[in-house]
Amino acid sequence: MSVLCRVLTRRLLTAQPQRLSVVGAQCFCSGASRLDGAQRDSAAISTSPVNLSYDVYDGKEDGIPLVFLHGLFGSKSNFHAIAKSLVQRTGRKVLTVDARNHGNSTHSPGLTYEAMTNDLKHLLNQLHIGKCILIGHSMGGKTAMVTALSQPSLVERLVVVDISPVPTSARTFMKGYIEAMKDVKVPSNIPRSTARRMAEDQLRNHVKEHSVRHFLLTNLVEQNGHYGWRINLEAISNHLMDLMGFPKFNTTYDGPTLFLGGSNSEYLSSEDYPEIQRLFPYADIQYIPDASHWIHADKPLEFISSIITFVQS
């Protein structure tokens, strides 16, 4: 499950920092693709930037903002509670961003790390953010690394959460998840709770873990009485090899870097250290005890403390 992340449901603090939510072009997927054949034929693997949906949690300080990037099948809401806590404890502005083809961001047939890096650069330019502290989990961690390596002037500091700059071997079961989601059929004009229960029953035979089913079902949405998936399943399916891989780089990112792994996860191993050190010569590699791939969900307080210590060091 190297590029999945669970929804963080635990409330960390009761205060409510002000949040501004900006939504990209909303899309809706019932079954395969939301792009018709002509669109697919005419839109090759484009790296042109698309509009991204994001939430802004305003802080009282003027420090460099923190920007969070989620993993595959995830959304910006995965970091909602984390972002609120970081604003309260650091005073810094925090942004959480939906990747293309995820959450409320625009859909596109292209889904490569180059494309996602261009999207992020475009968003930061729109928001007049010249530098950020970039924090990415899994797929978002790979996007963060590509951004730092190709656009180092944008990244003041880099945090990569439970992933490394080497290929990930998870395509088989990821493809199974996608096919299972495509096969889900839910009637129109029924209560959301009923729709969710029916969708989970259909996923159960192919997605055995309850936590993974729960996570995937966060993408089930209703529009005008009809239910479908808000993520672009076709684009994800077509680009699994790109998403599991990592682009070749001969450059380095020389800024402060933290690789933060879960001690119970297999996705940041000692076998990855040489490539990490080659590309990120000033990287520090740390592990949070008793945490799985979803560190921010398993150990939110320890995760937040690690981020704060790194940001303030």
Image (spheres, grey):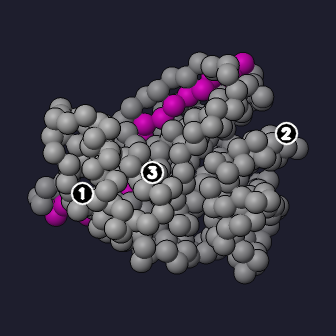
Residue at point 46% right, 51% down? 215
274 vs 201, nearest the viewer: 201
Residue at point 60% right, 26% down? 57
Q: Quadrant of the C terminus?
A: top right
The circle drawn on residue 184 is 1
> Is-magenta flag for residue 202?
no
Picture coordinates of residue 96 (x, y %)?
Answer: 55, 38
Residue at point 63% right, 20% down? 17
Taking 112 as reference, is 85 above or below it? above
Residue segment shown in magenta? 40-60
Query: Relative to residue 130, is residue 185 drawn left or right?
Result: left
Query: Relative to residue 65, is residue 76 drawn left or right?
Result: left
In this figure, which residue is indicated by the disc labeled 3?
Answer: 214
Picture coordinates of residue 14 (x, y %)?
Answer: 67, 22
Q: Cα distance, mark 1 to mark 2?
A: 46 Å
Q: Of callouts 3 and 2, which one flags the residue occurring earlier in the amino acid sequence? A: 3
In this figure, which residue is indicated by the disc labeled 2?
Answer: 312
Picture coordinates of residue 77 (x, y %)?
Answer: 51, 38
Q: Amino acid at mark 3?
A: His
Q: Residue furthest right?
A: 313
Q: Cα distance, mark 3 to mark 2?
A: 35 Å
Packing grade of label 3 (10 A; few <14, some 14-19, many >=20) is some
Query: Relative to residue 19, is residue 224 drawn left or right?
Result: left
